[in-house]
Amino acid sequence: MKTRITELLGIKYPIIQGGMAWVADYHLVSAVSEAGGLGVLGAGAAPADWVREQIRKVKENTDKPFGVNIMLLNPAAEEIAKVVVEEGVAMVTTGAGNPERYMKMWKEAGIKVFPVVASIGLAKRMIRSGCDGLIAEGTEAGGHIGDLTTMVLVPQLTSEFDIPVVAAGGIADGRGFAAALMLGAEGVQIGTRFVATYEANVHENYKDAIIKAKDIDSKVTGRSTGHPVRTLRNAQTLKYIKLEQEGTDFEEMERLTEGGLRRAVIEGDVKTGSIMAGQIAGLIKTKMSVEDVIQSILAEAKHTLKESQKYV
Ligand code: TUI
């Protein structure tokens, strides 16, 4: 399968793995890149040294291209922005902010830059500062999100700009992949589906929570604080939503969620931890290998695209 995304990144399939904090370490990243997609390390809130170590471990496990996601709220973001240059990483995605100030350095180093955008406004600025492509992430996605759905964000971007767009948020199978292509995207970014794989270095309780999740089981907290985050609902999210409705102050609510993602991913605390996952969790019924996830998405996409011809 050939699109501008596969050409730009030198990968077999235009399937990019979401750079999920705590989840996307070298285990998942090297498995996805080995299977022909693009693995992306999730730097999350980690220190720069951890990111450097992880990059080196990915290189020990695959000679295929991979990326690093830099979460721009991380106090170490600037240091990590330099680490990816020093380590010769092929591609960078960014989240939760505007990476303009690093763009020149990355471009000079030959890094392909794909900022995650949730609106046309940020997309415009990113194109002006020289990004290679965009990841258009809808509000269906897990973790930190914007307001627009993938269904409305992707076609507005692909109509307005000529840059390659990767669709993200709400995609976990071949039908979602085919739909993204119909909207003008040339690739997809997939997060939640890759969490529930054998290769993901994630506590089984977290994977089981995704497998068990139903359509309406994700909730968004933090809209009132300006950092909306989608997680699977548990005792903690319900408490948070109640505090939010009562107008509790920002710091107190931040304390409640501090370390929550680590507790869920590493310790398997799915009661008070933060189980970040997208709305599509309801579609995910079994744990699979990364290779099977990718191959089943491709086979189903091909079938779906062929079947759609009956309407023409
Ligand atoms: O970044 C993500 N997803 C994430 S980051 C994360 S760690 C975290 N934990 C708690 C609070 C905050 C972060 C978990 N999941 N996705 C990419 C994404 N970026 N979604 C939305 C945005 C975004 C939103 C507003 C990017 C830029 C933006 O505005 C920047 C500007 O200056 O206009």
Image: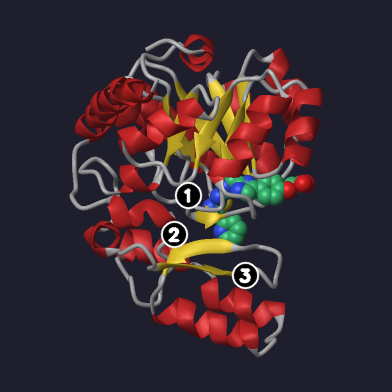
Question: Mark 1 vs ligand 1: CB under 8 Å?
Answer: yes
Determine whether the residue tagged by mark 1 lies in a helix, strand or loop.
loop
Category of crowding for the residue at label 1, using alpha-carbon neighbours closer than 10 angstroms: few (below 14), some (14–19), many (at least 20): many
Q: Are marks 2 and 1 in contact (CB under 8 Å)?
A: yes
N-terminal-most mark, 2 or 1: 1
Look at label 2 and name its amino acid. Answer: Met
User: 105 or 288: which is nearer to us?
Assistant: 288
Residue with the mark numbered 3: 222
Question: Mark 2 vs ligand 1: CB under 8 Å?
Answer: yes
Q: Quadrant of the C terminus?
A: top left
As drawn, the label of residue 83 is none
Look at label 3 and name its amino acid. Answer: Gly
N-terminal-most mark, 1 or 3: 1
Q: Where is residue 26, by image quadrant?
A: top left
Category of crowding for the residue at label 3, using alpha-carbon neighbours closer than 10 angstroms: few (below 14), some (14–19), many (at least 20): some
Residue with the mark numbered 2: 276
Determine whether the residue tagged by mark 3 lies in a helix, strand or loop.
loop
As drawn, the label of residue 21 is 1
Q: Judge whether 291 appears above or below 258 on screen.
A: above
Determine whether the residue tagged by mark 2 lies in a helix, strand or loop.
loop
Question: Mark 3 vs ligand 1: CB under 8 Å?
Answer: yes
Q: CA distance from mark 1 to mark 3?
A: 18 Å
In the displayed structure image, the side of residue 76 where residue 215 appears, left or right: left
